[in-house]
Amino acid sequence: MHIDPDSLSIADRYKLLIGGIVPRPIAFVSTISPSGRLNLAPFSFFNGISANPMTLLFCPANKPDGTEKDTLRNIAHPWTSSDQATGAGEFVVNVVSEAIALRAVACAEELSYGESEFDFAGLAPAPSSVVAPPRVAESPLSFECRCVALHRLNPGAPAGGNIVIGKVIAVHAHEGLINDRFHVDPEALRAVGRMGGASYCTTRQRFEVPMGRPALDLPALDFTRMKPAR
């Protein structure tokens, strides 16, 4: 089967992306507007970039009418400002755990600009260490970020793509989540991932495989008999 993406509608391209690129981690991004109002929204076009410098990215697409989402507006207004107290160019990526999955998904609701999803979903804002936007207190792991690059792939277009790259300048973790070697305990994290449509997944069922050539020496994996990690 061969598909030419340019022959498809935006909606059909989107379905191929979210159904085929799975599972995807969810960036639960908190920002602050120029007037000081808090915003919180989930994005699954999200991943880490590098450890040197420690950077990550997420991609808030434009709305169907081509206007930018509140998250992007808050980061980009004006994201080159030296007045960091306003939250310009700053954001926090909060990991979505099982405990807050429903409330995170609810924050995809289209609220009026300046209306806080923290209040809407009943989540608690906690002070960040460096940036102005607060983190989500209920999230087990949060990354305070400062925007270092913003790329608008199709400005003003419906569902136009945007890439926000942030340098991580502080990390918050719940007690016991990270050991003294900086390994994150996946059982304590209980992260939730995004699938296609309205489907989500947990990270309970895991397996370990040595990197590189040694993986070829292992017997075939029987996923049908694999039990969830405890």
Image: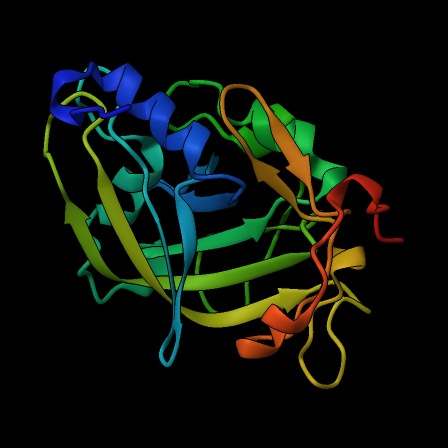
Q: Position of residue 145 (x, y in %)?
A: 41, 63
Q: Position of residue 34 (x, y in %)?
A: 30, 43
Q: Residue at x 47, y 45 (%)?
A: 29
Q: Residue at x 67, y 68 (%)?
A: 209
Can residue 10 be seen from the camera position used here? yes
**136 displayed left or right of 44:** right
12, 164: nearer the viewer: 12
Q: Position of residue 125 (x, y in %)?
A: 61, 46
Can residue 40 be seen from the camera position used here? no
Q: Residue at x 35, y 31 (%)?
A: 17
196, 187: nearer the viewer: 196
Query: Does residue 131 lie above or below 13 as drawn?
Result: below
Q: Position of residue 104 (x, y in %)?
A: 60, 33
Query: Does residue 103 lie above or below 140 as drawn?
Result: above
Query: Considering the image in quadrants, where does the N terminus appear?
Result: top left
Where is residue 8, by image quadrant?
top left
Query: Does residue 14 lie above or below 155 as drawn?
Result: above
